[in-house]
Amino acid sequence: MQSQLPLYPEQASNFAPQVDSLMLFITAICVFFATAITVAIVYFFFKFHRKNPNDVGAPIHGDARLEAAWLIIPLILAMGMFSWGAVVYVDYRHAPKDTLDVYVIGKQWMWKAQQPNGLKEINELHVPAGRNVRLILASEDVIHDFFVPAFRVKMDVVPGHYNTMWFRPTKPGRYHFFCSQYCGTNHAIMGGWVTVMEPSDYAAWLSGSSGGNANPVVAGEKLFAEKTCITCHIADGTGRAPSLNGLYGAQVLLADGSTVTADESYIRESILQPNAKIVARYQPLMPTFQGQLTEEQILALIAYIKSLQSQPVPAKGSGIAPPTGKK
Amino acid sequence: MSDTPNPLPGHNMPHEDYLNATYGIRSWLLTTDHKRIALLYLGSVTFFFFIGGIFATMIRIHLLTPTGALVTPETYNKLFTMHGVAMIFFFLIPSIPAVLGNFLIPLMIGAKDLAFPKINLLSWYIYIVGGCFVLYSFGTGGLDTGWTFYTPLSSVYSNSAVTPAVIGIFINGFSSILTGLNFIVTIHTMRAPGMTWFRLPLFVWAHYATSLVMVLGTPVVAITLLLAGLERMFHLGFFNPALGGDPILFQHLFWFYSHPAVYIMVLPAMGVVSEIIPTFARRPIFGYSFIAGSSIAIAVIGFLVWAHHMFVTGESAYAALTFSFLSYLVAIPSAVKVFNWTSTLYKGSISWDTPMLYALGFIGLFVIGGLTGLFLACLGLDIHIHDTYFVVAHFHYIMVGGAVMGYVGGLHFWWPKITGRLYPEALSRAAAITLFVGFNLTFFPQFILGYLGMPRRYHTYPPEFQVLNVLSTAGASILALGYLLPMAYLTWSMRYGKVAGQNPWPATGLEWKTDSPPPTENFQATPEVTWEPYDYLNRPDLGLTAGSPLPAPAHGDD
């Protein structure tokens, strides 16, 4: 339990201690300058108070060395703040390889989360302590923002593309999460609780309340057939479109010679705007599915495509770039 | 203070001045005199400040309890949106430039008027038309998008009166552009003989920098809001992803103007402070060319930092690093100004008159506002405090603690010039201190609220945040008193204040070498400038050097 008037929120993720140290560092510098200026002003204010109505001050016009000093010293300190901030930020933006991926969808005015096994939660999010968790964030309508003060993490949830964020919860407990981007009438109640559990409790919780038919891979496979994706994207590479085996996470060679990593955003874009990035050696034949799929259906398709990651890649008929360099 | 006009010995109101040269409503509504137009603006921006202030009061009362004490969520969202729109577009941006700048720039450079007097009047009418559209929006359903109008909330999902509001702000933009243009041309072409660039008052330098931002930035926000309006009215897909648009594009365009707009608000206030401090320390300003140059540097670098408002939108890490770096750079010229102002106090002859209290209050609040900007520019830290009350506190310290303290301080400094009369000194000092204390009590707790994680724009909040919210509301009631007092005694002084005379402080600027209030044509004869700025030693005409008669100071320090 914290004091009645805490100055910082609980520290419950890998980022929290880093951010709080950074906060202390910048606060120390700023308090120093604010105090120095205040003391100088107050001292001068009394020391040089006009004694005589006709007095004038000393004709001092400036000093080049002082000007240089207060240009350069603040600049150096500012670069220090910038650099430390940049280091922490790079950590925020580079998720480790082996993450537990949870999909989070924001809509006016609720949050839906989907665990890897398909378990769905509303305005609740359960995560295991000590595990790197990655949230893949999508919005059904306007811009929202997923903010967990105790984790010191925040990311906008923008309609039309995916943002991701990661963290490693360090302390079991229940923590507020908020919508932090104004999103209309009930913005202030669009929040809930993150529950950080011991890994064993988390596993028990997952298996205890899982519904098998909700599995997104199964739902995605069904959609893959229903939406006739399967007629072109044939697994053995003999179709009019590339096989999707082994696609997720691989480099895809595009018609313009560049490559792109097949992550969630790329797969989403390829479903909704198939002509945005054309795979090398394939014709732009695919129709757009913009407006025909809900965000949850898109996520199910992505989950299915991700499940094909370990399937054998056909020698011909895949979009995956051949390995570069000698091996 | 007696109830009747009580001229000091030797001071009488001028026989004819810009206020009594002509009479009647037509003489005001069709005037091309920059001083009268400044007063038209004074009335209209005060009106919008009052409206915005009422909304702010309701917001603070509502937040007394975690569940919200006063209004429904819809109404609360409208209150903070309309508070922002009224205050930013119709009070803060025009306040110092259109009131004090309009009044003073020709006087300070020894000109008869601005370069384009009719365009100056047109600016005011455009402002009024734009203001009417916005008031129409407020009155017919209100506005609930936030003053930032983020898409697709504003362009698709909001059910409030967005269209008239964006049209009003679009129209109002032209007022700002024309004012900026007028100032730039005037400063270039209408300086009196001897008024070289480096003899210009720093107030004029600050307005020159501000005008550049107005002319270059305002068209962008005007077009951006128009595009959002077109998307809303005609379903053209600019920002709505369902129509192939990009909601993040809106933010880039919006902040390209709206970040520099902060400098439109605070640069003129810095100009005011740069006039007040040497006057009441009675010595040359420390580092004239550094203060002048830093205004230009702020205007230029200020255009290159906009995407620091977008660190959590998922923008590329390289963009974020670049914009964080540039945001730290723009802090340096502001720091230079603060150090120079502080040094100007050293070995000065400091009086404790009201304008000086405002100027020093400005420095104190601007330092806190500016330094907390360093927290937000820091990438690793901004992620946590972005869109929380920390940001709310930060920009109120800059825009209210900075810009409004500067504006009210400037009003007090030039009030004798504008009206020819002085206000009650003890009361005005008490008001300045009330404002300073009330402001800090209102907004300092919000920094802590923000770091604790309270998001902004929340009509209800978890109970652990209540204590700090109650403190903030208590401060706001003191703050409100601090604003009402000057409104009351300044109005009173227009009729009953002591007659000020030409130069009550005395100050060194050209505007003090003509009558108070000045004649319509500003000067009886075109003045010639032979002195350096803020030079008290070589100015026998100020009556301060040995052997010269006492200047009959407006208020001694008892």
Image (cartoon, coloured by chain):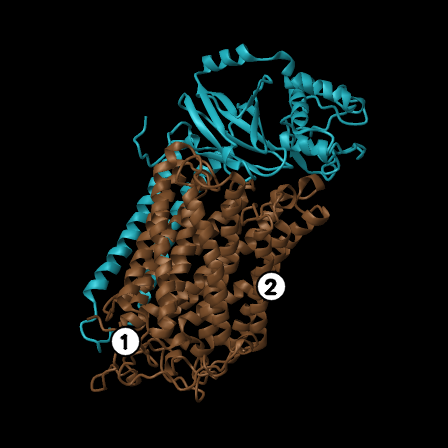
Chain colours: A cyan, B brown
In the picture, measured across the screen, residue B8 lies left or right of residue B455, that is left
In the picture, measured across the screen, residue A312 lies left or right of residue B298, that is right
Image quadrant holding the C terminus of chain A, namely top right
Q: Which residue is mark 1?
A: B554
Residue at 51% over, 58% down = B261
Say yes or no: labels 1 and 2 on the same chain: yes
Q: Which residue is mark 2?
A: B129
Residue at 25% over, 73% down = B555
Question: Horizontal and vertical percent for residue B527?
Answer: 42, 86
Q: Secondary structure at mark 2?
A: helix
Look at the picture and state if B124 lies above or below B15: above
Q: Residue furthest front?
A: B3
Q: Which mark is residue A96?
A: none
Asked whether B326 or B23 is in front, the reply is B23
Asked whether B325 or B345 is in front, the reply is B345
Label pair 1/2, CB-CB below 8 angstroms: no
